[in-house]
Image (spheres, rainbow, N blue to C red):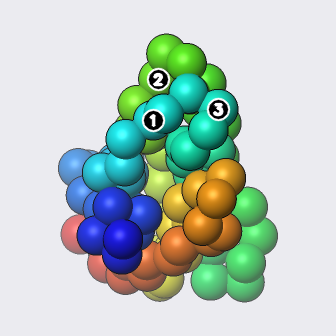
Amino acid sequence: MVQSHSPLLEINENTLSVFTPHEMKGYDHYIIKHIVLDNRFNIISEKVFDPSRETPISKHNIIGYEDKLYVLSICNNHDTWVDIIKIKKP
């Protein structure tokens, strides 16, 4: 279960891509949203998913952010899963 609920993260320049490898079974079992928090737990960005037509993939602008970002993947049945990524200056 961990592998299907934990968010997978990738940085490409100023964009953080988030993917949760979780099937979307309509409103029975799905990823509700992704949330990106800064190192003080302020919300930077979030993406809410429509389980009837979307996959849990999101892109977030991280221009100007450094240090840690916390990325949450929220499942309607299995609560919240987190991963942490460290942003480094180029």
Density class for disc 3 (Cα within 10 Å; few <14, some 14-19, many ≥20) is few
Label 1, on which residue? 24
The residue located at (30%, 51%) in the rendering is 21
User: Considering only order in the chain, which callout, 3 or 2, is on the residue closer to the N terminus?
Assistant: 3
How far is the residue under mark 2 from the one under mark 1?
8 Å
- Image coordinates for residue 12, horizontal then vertical, percent: 23, 50
Label 1 is placed on what type of residue?
Answer: Met
Question: Toward the viewer: 88 or 47?
Answer: 47
- Kindly state the secondary structure of the residue where label 3 is placed: loop
User: Considering only order in the chain, which callout, 1 or 2, is on the residue closer to the N terminus?
Assistant: 1
Label 3 is placed on what type of residue?
Answer: Tyr
The residue located at (43%, 77%) in the rendering is 83
Residue 14 in sight in this render: no
Q: In this view, does 3 lie above or below 68?
A: above
Label 2 is placed on what type of residue?
Answer: Glu
Which of the image's four quarters has the C terminus? bottom left
Seen from this angle, which residue lies furthest right? 42
Contact between marks 2 and 1 (CB within 8 A): the answer is yes
Label 2, on which residue? 54
Residue 27, labelled with which disc?
A: 3
